Amino acid sequence: MLVLIHPNEAAVIAEAYGIVRRHMTAKPAITLGLATGGTPVRLYEAMIAGYSRGEIDFARVKTFNLDEYVGLAQDHPQSYYHFMNVHLFNLVNIQRRNIHFLSGLPHDIEKHCEEYEKLIVKAGGIDLQILGIGRDGHIGFNEPSSSLCSRTRDKTLTRETIEDNRRFFTKDEDMPRWALTMGVGTILDSRNILVLATGRAKANAVAAMVEGPLTAMCPASALQMHPRVTLVVDEAAASKLNQDAYYRWMQANDYRMYDLLEKGKRTRRRRA
């Protein structure tokens, strides 16, 4: 796992946008896995700004959203369908036929989740999955004790997750207790994974994800098994990492290595 530590949230978002831009430029018909939440929405703001500047293009992009609340219609103001339209899709040139969501009101949950998995495979798999991380180490709505090889399915939310999200709902009884989510195994099938975390409240989860044991009690720890995960965090979220000095050393030297390789490429091209 490549750990990139930055001084503040603005620097985290700038780094994350640079990563997304490089992937989108390298593969214009990229398939993105998208998350919701406070940190991802700031990344989407950067992506919208990049689109406005002509740096990235969504015309051939396909997307699959990570999760959705059970019981919410698409037009509900707290559905993730509504969230993504407001914070990204309505503001870029993405084709509506290339946008994929889990439904909060499926006729048959099991069948719907199986079909979602098939749609991902039909699209050629997810090239870049964007993730946040919960305070208890959940990714998507894969709560602690989730199987590390799980596929897209329904999950009962923990009390902690419900409390974290309660502020978005005006009435307590409106707060969903269940969600549909890509499974941990589904996420691990992605070719590349980008995880964002900011704030001291995420520090314990970040440390458990990067340096803790592989355990279902911290579903994000499964990312240790993936060969291409980049974690971008601010100082506060990185504050519980034991090996932070090494991550900073690796970060600085990796950039120098890439600069060195790029100079070598330019030299070879001139000689040719």
Image (spheres, rainbow, N blue to C red):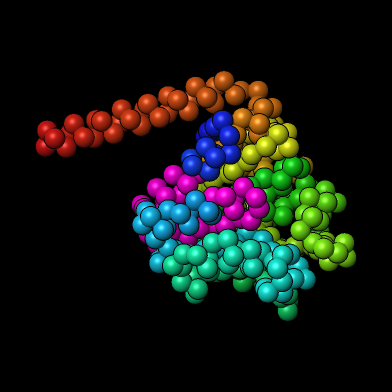
Q: Give the main secondary structure of the magenta stretch.
A: helix
* Above/below status of 198 relative to 253: below
Q: Is residue 115 left or right of residue 25?
A: right
The residue located at (67%, 27%) in the rendering is 239
In the rendered image, the quadrant that contains the N terminus is top right
* Above/below status of 140 relative to 175: above
Whole-percent x, y for residue 18 in the image: 44, 44
The residue located at (57%, 20%) in the rendering is 245
- Residue 237 in view, yes or no: yes
Magenta highlight on residue 257? no
- Out of 249 and 77, give the one closest to the viewer: 77
- Out of 180 and 69, give the one closest to the viewer: 69
- Out of 4 and 45, give the one closest to the viewer: 45
- Residue 219 in view, yes or no: no
Q: Which span is picked out in magenta?
A: 16-43
* Above/below status of 39 relative to 84: above
Residue at the far left in the pictured view: 272
Whole-percent x, y for residue 170 in the image: 82, 63
